[in-house]
Amino acid sequence: MNSNLFSELWNRRSLLLLFALNDVKARYRNSVLGFLWSFLEPLLMLSVLYVVFSNLFKNNIENYPIYLLLGLIVWYGFSRATTFGLSSLTAKSGIISRIYFRREIVVVSSTLTAFIMMGFEFIAFAIFVIAFHFTPSLTTVFLPLLLIDLFILSTGVSLFLAVLNVRFRDIQFIWQILLQAGFFLSPIIYQPKIIPEHLRQIFEINPLVPMIETAHNLVLYGHFPSLVMTAYITIVTGFVFVIGYITFKIKGKNIVEEL
């Protein structure tokens, strides 16, 4: 891997942030409420999903509203980041063809856009925490470390998908199907313990499973992840990022021509 990547991203952090903020602003451009939608949208979305899933899935999960909403935020952070990242190169083809800079910046900025939006969702989440009179565990302070892993994982997947999407536009449709399946294969509306033991290892191959489970444990139950789970998250996150980056470097040499 090119060791200059991270230093280049840091040196171009103003461009990175500019792309990300412009993408956030573009979502609410010409709307009556403008930037206020960045707070209202996640609040309304989480409210609807809470009403739907709380009534459809009767369960005895402790603090289920918080359990559900936290899982949704982590899942939608990954889903939105990879969806934005997948189409980032084609969406900014005009800029890419006119100005030279490292193309990875476009993909990383799209992932950053999704995580800025996740920040607004956590503000909405805080409102629910207050409304349900829930007190998060002290271990919640370690949640940002998990979100860093989630960001790296999302960036790795986005790098891989973005460069393939330039040549094979069917990738975006395939990825949406996989995301829909992944939602129900992640412990968002249920707990992992309901999965039969003989299927548990297959179920936990999905890196979002231990990540969502860790978020639940940190915020709701005051439990740290086991060393095995921590190692798995770290190794898989690093592996996915490296594969995504290498694929981007190999396949991305002729991006301008293919766009």
Image (cartoon, rainbow, N blue to C red):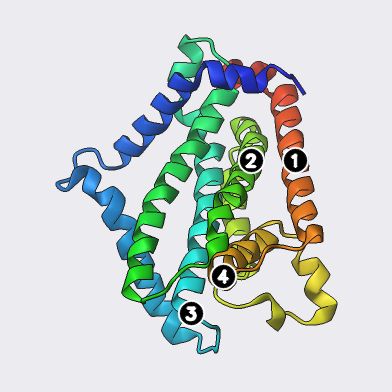
Q: Along the horizontal axis of the image, is 86 left or right of 225?
A: left
Mark 4 or 3: in front is: 3
Q: Looking at the image, which residue is at 42% across and 42% down? A: 116
- State how far apart marks 2 and 3 are (Cα): 29 Å
Please provide percent x and percent y for residue 205: 77, 60
The reply to whether the C-beta atoms of the residues labelled 2 and 3 are less than 8 Å apart is no
The residue under label 4 is: 188
* Residues tagged 2 and 1 counted as in contact (Cβ below 8 A): yes
Residue position marked by numbered label 1 in the rendering: 238
Query: In the displayed structure, does residue 44 sit left or right of residue 99?
Result: left
Q: Nearer the viewer, mark 2 or mark 3?
A: 3
**Residue for badge 3:** 63
Whichever of labels 2 and 1 marks the residue nearer the N terminus, that label is 2
Residue at disc 3, secondary structure: loop
- The residue furthest front is 138
Q: Quadrant of the C terminus?
A: top right
Q: Earlier in the sequence, mark 4 or mark 3?
A: 3
Residue marked by disc 2: 152
Tell me which amino acid carries mark 4: Ile
Amino acid tagged 3? Asn
Q: Give the percent coordinates (x, y) of residue 124.
A: 34, 60
| Above/below status of 253 relative to 136 | above
Name the residue type under label 2. Answer: Ile
